[in-house]
Amino acid sequence: MRRFLLILAGLAAAVTVGAQDRQTDSLRHSFGRQKLTSSNRKSTPYADTLDTGNPAVKVVLYNNGTYRYVKDPAKVVEDSVFTANWDTRAVNPYREEPEDLPDRFSIWIVDTLDSYCCPYQTRPRSQYGYRHGRRHQGIDLPYPTGTPVPAAFDGKVRISDYVGGYGNLVVIRHANGLETFYGHLSRRDVQSGDWVNAGDIIGLGGSTGRSTGPHLHFETRYRGAAFDPAWLIDFETGTLRHRLLKIRSWYFNPNQRYVQSVDDEDEIFRTDEEDRIAAEEQAKKEAAARAAAEAAAMRYHTVRSGDTLSAIARKYHTSVRELCRLNGIKETSILRVGQRLRVR
């Protein structure tokens, strides 16, 4: 068994902490589009761990005879994502605007080495967007005071503090650069710098800060820019919508809530090559439409005996210069009976 796992570990060695190397076209359409239900790997005691060819990846052997590959937090936290723009006080430590982000980019939310846990399965009480004239940068989930709050994904706690209107706030940064916010807690059970796994309890639900009653304020941000958490999680079913999220710049618009559309979803998960082909096809369609519209608007005149360019121009409410341009002739050109002239 141990030898078998070490052989498999050679495959795991190809998996890196950085998400960019794993964003292949085949995964985008299969693995990346998979939905994921909440899981808690801590529910099964483990007996041992094995090293792999990748120092950031370990094999965990569980008491029930199963195993899985996991990331080693001690190595993961060495990544620059956990050092650059790291501030244990500022809600937004980034010095950039949403407009500074690429028009489109992909981030792995959960890969084969990560876990996910829905913060709370329920119908959201208040949605992302403007509320009472103020921007609401997350969603509010009805959450009884004292109810344990789990971390949604693996990550490192950046903020654990009482922060203004958020009240007791925990902010977790994840290896993909995403940050999740958990506000209005009655109690915080983690400290800045702690590593947490999906499902770990980070505090208790409450109503601290600017709050009208017990609830969990949950935000998702990328490099400081907030977007609707519903793009990630279906809170009514508790499922993660996709393992791979392809973000569009307009997601960061405060008026842009999640909208479910099969056509939009297919467009979001297109590969770069498919995007190029789609753009070419769209350009051809637009060119054909313009040509068809132009052809439909064309009108011709058949020259009769006695016709002149000036007479024809007056008849069709145009100019001699325009007639010459449309037909590639000069004002001094001699017209022939039966000749067809384009007049529009």
Image: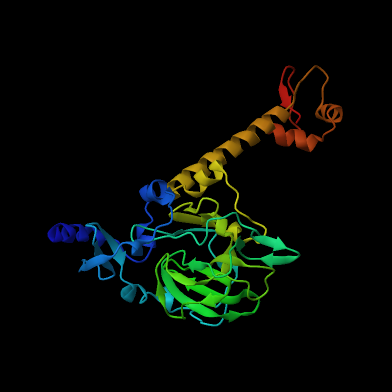
- Looking at the picture, does residue 16 appear above or below residue 34? below
Residue 183 in which image quadrant: bottom right
* 80 vs 329, nearest the viewer: 80
Residue 61 is at least partly visible in this image: yes
- Looking at the picture, does residue 144 appear above or below residue 289? below
- The residue depicted at 42 percent of the width and 68 percent of the height is 200
User: Could you say where residue 62 lies in the image, as x and y percent from the top left?
Assistant: 25, 62
Q: In this view, does 300 lie to the left or right of 183?
A: right
* 146 vs 54, nearest the viewer: 146
- Looking at the picture, does residue 75 appear above or below residue 236? below
Q: Is residue 327 left or right of residue 175?
A: right
- Quarter of the image with the N terminus in it: bottom left
- The residue depicted at 86 percent of the width and 27 percent of the height is 315
- The residue depicted at 34 percent of the width and 66 percent of the height is 17
- Quarter of the image with the C terminus in it: top right
User: Could you say where residue 139 lies in the image, as x and y percent from the top left?
Assistant: 61, 62
- The residue depicted at 52 percent of the width and 60 percent of the height is 120
